Image (tube, grey):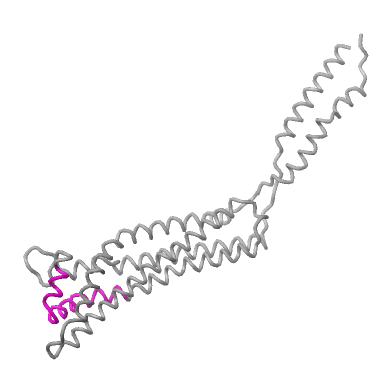
Amino acid sequence: MPAFSPLAATNEKNRPIDVIWSHEDDEEEQTIPVVKNQGFVAKVFNSRNTQHAKLIVLAVLALVHFYYLNDFLVKFAAVDQMAQDARYIKPSGINHRMDMASVRYTFQGFIDYKKNLWMTVGAMCASLATTASLLTIYSSPRDVFNRAAMAVIRVFDLCAFMFISFLLFARISSAVIINHTTQHSLRAASRISVNLVNDLGNSLSCTVEPRGELPICSRQIIDSIFPVQVIEYLIILCILTGAYIGLAYLIEWCIRHFFPPTHEKLTPISAISRNLLVSSRCSSDNSVLIAA
């Protein structure tokens, strides 16, 4: 009958595979922290959620701009052609100068509106670029990126997004000018030369004065721009989203410096495998002892 030696069982448990597992456990325990006791505020006001919310708002802004953009550009081209043709018409009548001033004033409102439109699109693209950069950073190990660089990106991100609100607010003045002066400037253009409004009506399939079933040119032009009420709603949406982003950055900074989250180590899978193997070895040792 073979003799059982306790030393053999001890040597069996200290095989090199256990040493390897022990080394792997030390490495995995250092790299698998789990955040505990993360509050509701920290879950809601975190940087990743704010960027997702901003993406939704940017999508809404893009859809609204896409809906109005093409129609406005068509109307702008027609008004631009009318304003350019009016410059080369020989003055006639005592009110010619006032009529030209009316046409130029309205056309300047169109120019300002168009500039504001493209600047808003540029600000939206810049905000989208910073969102993509921040989401890439958040999905990577934080130690790879410098905290100062991340702070600079966040400041630029918030400024670029809030600049959209400023541009929308400035667009209201141009929209008001177009709404209140378009019909008057078209009548002034008809006094300068009937051909001006006839060419405009032919290009837009409309009429300056009510006639038959043709739509009114001024109504078509005004409908091609953003309604003031829609602009106001978009401003409120952007301000609320910007406040959400800024508040999330502030809360994250306060939590990091004043209320650091607690961490817990996850049990590595290698440790579970090792425990199962040790248990099986103990069972086999007990079987040997019983047989002995």
Q: Left or right of 109: which side holds 183?
A: left
Q: Left or right of 17: which side holds 91?
A: left
Question: In this rendering, is residue 273 above or below 3?
Answer: below
Q: Is residue 186 magenta?
A: yes
Magenta span: helix, strand or loop, mainly?
A: helix
In this view, the residue in front, 113 or 276, is: 113
Question: In this rendering, is residue 180 above or below 49?
Answer: below
Give coordinates of residue 187: x percent, y percent: 14, 78
Looking at the image, the residue that sits furthest to the top is 1
Q: Is residue 15 magenta?
A: no
Q: Left or right of 124: which side holds 277?
A: right
Give coordinates of residue 97: x percent, y percent: 19, 88
In this view, the residue in front, 94 or 180, is: 94
| Picture quadrant where residue 67 is located | bottom left
Give coordinates of residue 254: x percent, y percent: 63, 63
**Which stretch appears magenta?**
174-201
Q: Residue at x 55, y 61 (%)?
A: 248
Q: Left or right of 34: which side holds 63?
A: left
Q: Residue at x 26, y 74 (%)?
A: 178
Q: Residue at x 59, y 62 (%)?
A: 251
